[in-house]
Image (spheres, grey):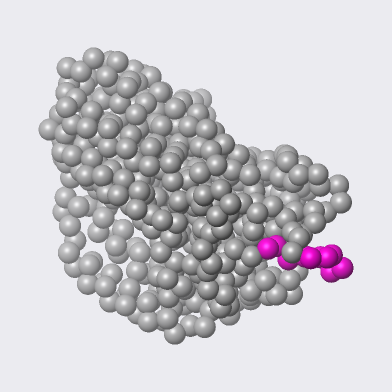
Amino acid sequence: MSARPAPAGATGGGRDFSARLMTPLLLGSVLNPINTTMISTGLVAIGRDFGVGPAGTSWLVAVLYLACAVAQPAAGRIADLFGPRRAFLCGLVLVVAAGLVGALAPGFGWLLASRLLLGVGTSTAYPSALAMLRARSRQVGRPAPRSVLGLLSLAGMSSAAVGPVLGGVLTATTGWRGIFAVNVPLALLGLVLAVVWLPRDQPRSARQADGAGSGVRELDPLGMLLFFLTLVPGMFFLLDLAHPAWYLLPVVVVVGAVFTRWQLRRPRPFLDLRSLGSNRALTTTYLRHGLSYLVIYCVMYGFTQWLEEGHGLSSFHTGLTMLPMSVTAAVCSLLGARTRGIRAPLTTAAVLLAGGSALLAVTGSGAPWVVLLLAGALFGVPQGLVSTGNQAAVYSQSPPEGTGSAAGLQRSAQYLGAITAASLIALFYGQRADDAGLHELALVTGVLSLVLIVLTVTDRALRRPRSGQAPPPAPASKSPAGTVPRPADPAEPTAAPSATGCRTPAPREPGTRA
């Protein structure tokens, strides 16, 4: 059976995934990571103006992570049901509103509301972008190139790296309100480009035919609320492991049990736990992604803080020391995007995370600068490989009608890793980052890295079939919309996943021959 022919004028290569398609997607995708780091250089000024101490201003960081962790899968589900272009545009409108609220905020509470809106609005871009790329790949009859997926990873990492610099420049020139106001022109530009260049969503009838469903009933608002009520107390517990609020754990268990029961009874749930449990490949990818970023964020924030307080470097020299991490992460993101396999880059990343942790475990305040630069580079390489590798795994292991939801859950796993990393740093450092705290943190990241090595090496779904060997067949039973069925081998390049998660030939246009 032949693959679906590409539309007239589409000759493959860059024209299938052209700059007109990618530019608004990339612009929207940078808004989330840049807002997670841009605020860091404005916290002192904000606290001074509103009379809020470090414990209070830290909520400007935490509330964004909380909003993103909950909103990412919800935004992905909305993109799958109502169309990724609509979800993308609505998210940018929220970003404009959030930027205005923050820039004009008369009190600290308004800033928290602005950051909450920013978390929700920016969360739509990444799952919507992956859903649009999947729709485009089905239209042209071939998967999105790894280089295209790598651009999304590179945009996220590079914008996160320049966030503190941009925030510092804006705070120094326009005041801290500029950190919020800059979102307005960026989001407006993204809105204009998206309206003009992004293809319209499929008609409702076409989405229903693909198994995606449509309408508020398919959205499962009660399921979303229960998901929110399950995650939030768990995140509050993780945010302060030094003083654990044990009473929150029974709340998580009870609400989680209600959420699980509701999802199992729904014919089209917000999160199909039954299918997710049967799709071990995708579940393992989420676990691997969350653990990887737990280690990466421990180093990104913990190592940086130790450089200033434990090693005695200035902020300027700390930034220079961390530069190899940012550069190698960007370079390896591009290299990872050009790599055909998934398992080898992810295994390499896990090994380097273990090696970097071992180096930090023996590094002290008297370590020469070259050792510090090497440590940063060792953690920069896996940062780039993990991002592109796991993104490609989610893209290939999720069904076409559930790409947005799958991408959102991937980001939720990442933010859970970030919140846990912040708690571990506070637990081991206490009032000051010293050598003992760094060594304890490195011991934990080293153990987690070894777990990552085992998870990656033993993940059979990441193994590419030998030349001429077909991937193992998958069950052909149809799954309801919103499910995350078990896929066949993700390395198969020419077949598109069906609603069951099996690799089946792409649908043909009427009149084409098999």
In depth, the one of 509 and 85 nearer the eye is 509
What residue appears at the point 28 percent right and 31 percent down from the top-left corner?
A: 356
In depth, the one of 462 and 366 nearer the eye is 462
Image quadrant where residue 435 sits: top left
Q: Is residue 125 left or right of residue 380?
A: right
Image quadrant where residue 424 sits: top left
Extreme residue in the front direction: 468
Name the spot of residue 88 as percent of width and height, x first: 63, 55
Q: Mostly what secondary structure, the magenta segment?
A: loop
Residue 37 inside the magenta-drawn segment: no
Residue 375 shows in this picture: yes
Name the spot of residue 507 as percent of width and height, x first: 73, 66
Q: Is residue 478 left or right of residue 368?
A: right
What residue appears at the point 81 percent right and 44 percent down from the top-left corner?
A: 11
For the N terminus, the image quarter is bottom right
In depth, the one of 506 and 444 nearer the eye is 506
Image quadrant where residue 276 sits: bottom left
Residue 71 shows in this picture: no
For the C terminus, the image quarter is bottom right
How many numbered marks does the figure carry? 0
Name the spot of residue 34 as percent of width and height, x first: 49, 39
Does residue 14 lie above or below 304 as drawn?
below
Extreme residue in the left direction: 436
Name the spot of residue 75 as percent of width and height, x first: 54, 61
Does residue 436 lie above or below 468 as drawn?
above
What residue appears at the point 19 percent right and 61 percent down from the top-left corner?
A: 245
What residue appears at the point 23 percent right and 40 percent down from the top-left corner?
A: 446
In depth, the one of 210 and 26 nearer the eye is 210
Provide the residue span drawn in magenta. 505-514
